[in-house]
Structure formats: C-alpha cells, structure tokens
Amino acid sequence: MTTDMSSVIPTDREFQLFQQLIENKLGIFLPPQKKALLSNRLWKRLIACDIKGFDEYYRYIQSPQGKGELNLALELITTNETYFFREQKHFDYLRDDILPGVKAGSNFRVWSAAASTGEEPYSIAMLLTDRCPTTWELLCSDVNRKVIEQAKVGIYPEMRIKNIPPDYLRRFCRKGVGSQEGNTRVNAELRQAVQFFTLNLHEDFPDLGQFDLVFLRNVLIYFENENKTKILERIASTLKPNGILFVGHSESLHGISSRFIPVKPAIYRLSAR
Ligand SMILES: C[S@@+](CC[C@H](N)C(=O)[O-])C[C@H]1O[C@@H](n2cnc3c(N)ncnc32)[C@H](O)[C@@H]1O
C-alpha cells in the first residue's frame, strides 16, 4: 500500500480520461486547472483500493467489479457547499411576492433540484409551513446519494444553522443533548414534509409532475453551455405555465436558454412558447 501522494498526481493523459468520464456521467466539466482538485478528492480512494496510479484506478472503476467505487468517486467529485437561507433575496421574493398570490385550494409544488445536504430544501419548507396558504409538496433531489442521506437525517452542527431566523429555530429545530450536544436537528414534521431522492440532472428525468417553483441554484456553474441548455430544456418541461426558476446569483441564463424571462436577479419565469 502506498502513502506517497506524489505518486498519485494524475498525468495530463490520466486527467483527460477522468475529465471525459465525469462529463459523460455527471455533465460536470472539469477544466485543466482542476487537476489538483481531482487529485485532492480521489487520492485517498486510490490508497483505500491499494491502487498505485490514476490510470489503474480509471480501469478499475470502468470494470464491472468497480461499479460501487465509480459511484464513490463521482460523489467525491461533486461540490456540496450550501447553507440555510442562502441568497436571502430569493426567500424574500418567495415570502413577499409569490406566496401571497397562491390560491387557497390549489396544491403548490416545489422542487429543489440540487439539494445537497438539505439546507436549501429545509429553508424552503420552513417558509412554506409558515406562509403557504394551501397544501404544498416539496421534492428534493441531488445526484450524490450520500448528501441525500445526510439531508434525510437533518442534523446540523451549530455553526451551520446561524442563518435560520430565531423564531424558525424555535419552531422547526431541536437542540441535541448528550452525544448530540452542539448539533441541531430539523424537527420530524419538517423532515416528513420533504420527499428526498437521487436524480442526475444530466440524464432524462422521470415523470415528476409539474412544479410551481424549481430551485436550481449553484449547480449550473459546473456545466458547459451545451449541457446547461439541455438541463434547462428538461427543467422547463417540469414547470407549470408561468412557473418560476431560481438559479444561483453567479449564474445567468443569458445566451443559454430562451425558455425563461428574467424577473429579478437570478429569478426567471417560464416563457409561453
Ligand atoms: C454547490 S451545491 C448547491 C446546493 C444548493 N442548491 C445551494 O445553492 O446551496 C451543488 C450540488 O449540485 C449537485 N450536482 C452536481 N452535479 C449534479 C448532477 N449532474 N445532477 C444533480 N445534482 C448535481 C452536487 O452534488 C451538489 O450537492
């Protein structure tokens, strides 16, 4: 078994193999300057598998017996940074402009399509429980099975919950005691209100029905324009007429999709065809 990290830096050729594999499987484009990221995220797996170099690891994860390892490697490549009430203006818009106009008696449907460890969907769920005048459904997915499992559990260290408004903290969260001291758990009512599942945005979607809102935030940045366009086309087909799409504040649909009309920064409305 090797612990010499210098021997697990990928060559340019090896990097290209992983670049193609990751783009094929996830749609994520790793530019050449991300060679160090590939190495940082995967070298421990090479050691765990007792494999000497990226070339051998690549062949292993492409083989039938390496399928589980391939999934692990792909999960390690995704970047899962997130936090509660990230990009507060989106939540202000939902509270002040969207929810007051929702008709009683309708079923309001929301999809968090790159949900990561759950902070985004639970922020939405808190607001919907507080302000939505009708029944609602919240579907949450991510390609990374591990983050979805964490999201279902809904336990967060104290430093991660600082953006939750104090009244929501009191109403929707429980402080851990004993071995859970220092952690906070989203309460059972909220956890049960949210439907979690894995879904790869780079593949055709199963039938999820139509949504009033889709949150697709801070994930488009990882794709090249051609894949962004395809994903946005699939997302458009899941929105109800006039449905709203939220993207990250550093993400623009300009020149990428003509299916959406800008409403506010990083907020779009589905255009009528
Ligand atoms: C940076 S996080 C964003 C989380 C949250 N939406 C937010 O804005 O805080 C990006 C998430 O996109 C997910 N992701 C990356 N590629 C994906 C794909 N092809 N399909 C679905 N999710 C993907 C990652 O696993 C990760 O959890």
Image: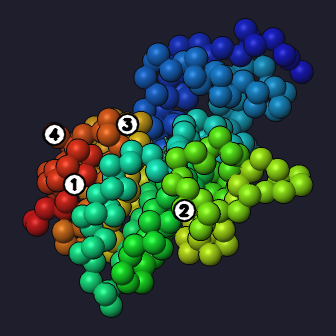
* Pair 2/1: label in front: 2
Residue drawn at (33%, 56%), measured in percent from left and top? 92
Which of these two is toward me, 239 or 161? 161
Q: Secondary structure at mark 1?
A: strand
- Quarter residue 236 falls in: bottom left
Binning the other alpha carbons within 10 Å of mark 3 as few (below 14), some (14 to 19) or many (20 upward) gives: some
**Tag of residue 255:** 4
Binning the other alpha carbons within 10 Å of mark 1 as few (below 14), some (14 to 19) or many (20 upward) gives: many
N-term-proximal mark, 2 vs 3: 2
In percent of width and height, residue 10 lies at 62, 16
Looking at the picture, which amino acid does disc 3 mark?
Ile
- Quarter residue 95 falls in: bottom left
Residue drawn at (27%, 83%), measured in percent from left and top? 103
N-term-proximal mark, 3 vs 4: 3
The residue that mark 2 highlights is 168
Q: CA distance from mark 2 to mark 4?
A: 39 Å
* Pair 1/4: label in front: 1
The residue that mark 1 highlights is 268
**Tag of residue 221:** 3
Task: Work out which quarter of the rendered image holds the N terminus and state it.
Answer: top right
Which of these two is toward me, 108 or 180? 180
